[in-house]
Amino acid sequence: MNRVNILNASIDNLSKRELLELLNQYGGVVVTPNVDHLIRLQKDPDFYRVYQLSNYRVCDSKIVFLASMFLGSPIQEKISGSDFFPDFYTFNRNNKSIKIFLLGAAQGVAKKAQEKINAKVGREIIVGVYSPPFGFEDDEKECDKIIELINQSGATVVAIGLGAPKQEKWIFKSKEKLANINIFLAVGAAIDFEAGHKPRAPKWMSEVGLEWLYRLLYEPKRLWKRYLVDDIPFFWLILKQKLNLYKNPFWYIFEPKDDSPRKRISVFLP
């Protein structure tokens, strides 16, 4: 499979249709690198390790898409989690083997998303939801409760909207206990968007790379530091890569030799 290296992430150069077909055929874990992820991948070795063990890494950001063009290895399509999730459940509208559990969002939001999606699809494709409390990832009993809820729901897919890197790390901490789950989707704010709890940026803003600005204006207290401080070094790092001066800070961490999405090792390395 063709891949594009942007900083220390290897992004699968897939179309949305190709990803949908691969997931239905082989299953796997989908992560969606954006600027914030790529910055975190410079600082967080555990997050980097999780990325190496994911099955599919697809471009979530127009800015990352444009960076790939600047680096001379253009990605064919932006596939953001928030756009991909509705395409996924629509694509599987009549596929009765696809049953989705929604994990994330504020209390009551996931339930609202469930009602809207099931009405749109015309069947009970969302079979369970749960909005975990803050700090749940450090509570072993709460994590066991979530695993039990998912296992009892009959779901074959989990769509997780907990924010990065929490959602990605939780997947690899828990996935071996979720015997019936074939597909793991890290979807960020998609559950909020599906419920109508938060508005999506206008399509034209997304297409020109300004979705971040729309989200900043909507949630300035939560997002100002991420967008205006933490993520700014991305542009310097991309320039360094263009000049062949960039070095992966976690080059020593194990990476599977066979990098095909179906054969990447799928167990969490402690």
Image: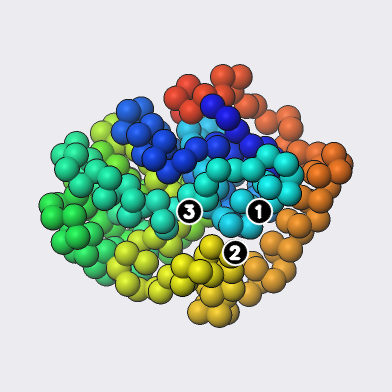
Verify CB contact (< 8 Å) between mark 2 and mark 1: yes
Residue located beneath label 3 in the image: 80
Verify CB contact (< 8 Å) between mark 3 and mark 1: no
Element type at mark 1:
helix
Among the two numbered marks 2 and 1 on one chain, the one whose residue lies closer to the N terminus: 1
* Tally of marks: 3
Separation of marks 3 and 1 at Cα, in angstroms = 14 Å
Give coordinates of residue 269: x percent, y percent: 55, 30
Looking at this view, is 80 or 70 the one in front? 70
Residue located beneath label 2 in the image: 209
> Which mark, residue 66?
1
What's the residue at 31%, 33% (across, down)? 24
Q: Quadrant of residue 148?
A: top left
Task: Report whether 95 appears left or right of 161.
Answer: left
Whether residue 25 is visible, yes or no, is yes
Q: Quadrant of residue 76?
A: top right
What's the residue at 48%, 22% (across, down)? 263
Mark 2 residue type: Gly
Whether residue 40 is visible, yes or no, is no
Q: In which quarter of the image is the N terminus?
A: top right
Element type at mark 3:
loop
Mark 1 residue type: Leu
Among the two numbered marks 2 and 3 on one chain, the one whose residue lies closer to the N terminus: 3
Give coordinates of residue 45: x percent, y percent: 66, 42
Looking at this view, is 80 or 150 the one in front? 80
